[in-house]
Image (tube, rainbow, N blue to C red):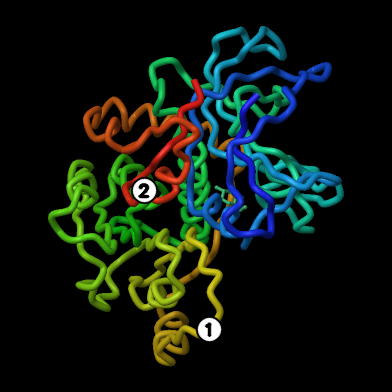
Amino acid sequence: MQALVVTPGAAATARLADVFEPRAAPGEVLLRPLEIGVCGTDAEICAGLFGSAPKGEGHLILGHELLAEVAADGGGFAAGDLVAATVRRSCRRCAACAAGFPDACLTGDYLERGITRLHGFASELACERPEHLVPIPRELGRLGVLAEPASVCARAIRHARSIGGRQPWEPARALVLGAGAVGMLATFFLRLEGLEVLTASREGAGSDKAELVGASGASYLPVSDLEESGDFDLVVEAAGSGELMARALGLLRRNGVACILGIDGHSGQVSVDRRTLGVDVVIGNRALFGSVNAARQDWARAVELLVEVGTRWPDAATRLVGLRVEPGRFQEAFDYTGVKATLRFA
Ligand code: BGC
């Protein structure tokens, strides 16, 4: 069968290859991937900067943003059911993984499908254990391919609420930095939760992304126009810019919380104003935290939120995935600058 593979650690090796068909081991569910979303992590793996192959193998099958159809009854699922799958697997030796929270793994020795030491789902068939599958309601349809990035947002919002909630806090205004899939989904989800949202990104005020942000009732601002207003209860950094991450601290109100979701692996320094860090963060009880991956409860919430987005903003919801290409055209998907591109397997 065909799969999208890379040689981890080497640049520009992504290719469609013939690989062995997986056979479902006892207890596993056989899946027919329908659509696989691509993201910045996949691009980094393709650039040879991230990712690793399963032990003893030279290649890694990509794909961690899965929407699949169950191919044969099993594990409590029926043939034809739509499912997504969680990404991270337990390191088997830490308290967080033992408690069912590999998203908070304490050793860093976790595995991740399509990223770290486990093949992903960008192939014609794949297998997974039922406990790692997430049911996708029929009404969500192809939008279910956004369940993975949505779960990352759901975790971030849950953690932000819990960190902010350590003291009296009434989040009313949020700033989202970045309008890729994670920034855009965070925008829509925070709007659903009733917050006033400003989303700032690189694109101009008349861009498609600006319009999509506007469709959710949020405001859009080219990030170059962002001022140090200190006016936000919540800042979500989803642009992957170290400079913006550092600036987030200065954009918060009293008791404000900033969450970093983007990754910036570049070397170099960013600077933070001494008074922002040494006075405002302290006197204003502000917090900055990072968040990655998602727990089972975040996946459940993500699916609920996506259904709500599809119901409340049906037109905008269909525009979130702006490019769907067959697997052989993977480069177009990687080069896409809209919100989300996917590979269509079936
Ligand atoms: C994925 C996460 C994963 C992270 C680090 C992200 O692109 O969405 O599930 O944990 O990469 O590998």
Residue 264 vs residue 7, the one in the foreground? 7
Q: Which residue is mark 2?
A: 336
Residue 18 vs residue 26, the one in the foreground? 18
* Side (left or right) of 98 relative to 66: right
Whether disc 2's CB lies below 8 Å from ligand 1 is answered: no
- Residue found at the far bottom of this picture: 274
Q: Is residue 162 above or below residue 280?
A: above
Residue at point 68%, 59% (across, down): 9
Residue at point 50%, 33% (across, down): 327
* Side (left or right) of 243 relative to 129: left
- Dot 2: what SS? loop
Q: Quadrant of the N terminus?
A: top right
- Dot 1: what SS? loop
* Side (left or right) of 111 relative to 291: right
Q: Kindly report which numbered mark, 1 or 2, lies closer to the viewer in this rendering.
A: 2
- Tally of marks: 2
- The first of marks 1 and 2 along the sequence is 1
**What is the crowding at mark 2: few (fewer than 14 residues within 10 Å), some, or many (at least 20)?**
some
Q: Is residue 262 above or below residue 309?
A: below
Q: CA distance from mark 1 to mark 2?
A: 27 Å
Task: Give the image location of residue 120, x and y in percent.
Answer: 65, 37
Q: Which residue is mark 1?
A: 268
Disc 1 marks which amino acid? Gly
Disc 2 marks which amino acid? Tyr
Task: Give the image location of residue 189, x and y in percent.
Answer: 36, 43
Residue 196 vs residue 206, the one in the foreground? 206
Task: Give the image location of residue 169, x and y in percent.
Answer: 40, 60
Residue at point 31%, 66% (across, down): 232
Residue 278: mark in rendering: none
Residue at point 60%, 8% (across, down): 79
